[in-house]
Amino acid sequence: MGTRSFIAIKNNESTYDAVYCHWDGYEEGVGRTLKENYTNEDKIKELISKGAMTTLGKDISDCEFYSSRGEQIKVYRGLSAEELRKKAIHNWCEFLYKFENSEWSTTKL
């Protein structure tokens, strides 16, 4: 089974953009990959712009996005912190990763 997660970046004082990731969402999987390989804000924004993914790779070219299978690119934009949490729960996510203030935080849902 997949361990679902949401990956988000804070835009400004009050909103986030986010995407869904299906596999390996636990802290030793997606969490570690984000913390070790996605520390540049521009790279994180590019990752999120690609939409929902089945797997997160160490580089964007190693990720498997739903769009590569012809499916809709799903990016959640301009969410408040509460909306972000609700969307993650609605998508059956177990973990929420947020990049803000130049670092990743993890919330177990």
Image (cartoon, grey):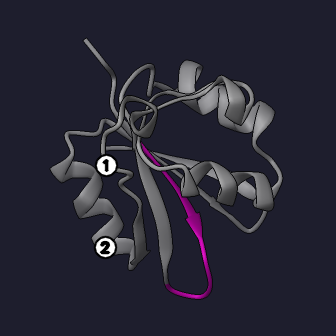
Residue found at the very far top of the displayed protein: 1
Is residue 78 in the magenta section? no
Q: Quadrant of the C terminus?
A: top left
The segment highlighted magenta reads: 6-14
- Nearest to the observer: residue 97 or residue 91: 91
Q: State the image quarter where residue 23 is shown.
A: top left
Q: State the image quarter where residue 63 is shown.
A: top right
Residue 69 at x, y percent in the picture: 37, 29
Is residue 11 in the magenta section? yes
* Residue at image point 62% right, 85% down: 12
Reading the image, the residue beneath label 2 is 82
User: Callout 2: 10 Å neighbours few (<14), some, many (20+)?
Assistant: few
Give the mark nearest the N terminus, 1 or 2: 1
* Residue at image point 78% right, 60% down: 42
Q: CA distance from mark 1 to mark 2?
A: 24 Å
* Residue at image point 73% right, 37% down: 35
Q: Which kind of residue does numbered mark 1 sit on?
A: Gln
Reading the image, the residue beneath label 1 is 72
Residue 90 at x, y percent in the picture: 16, 52
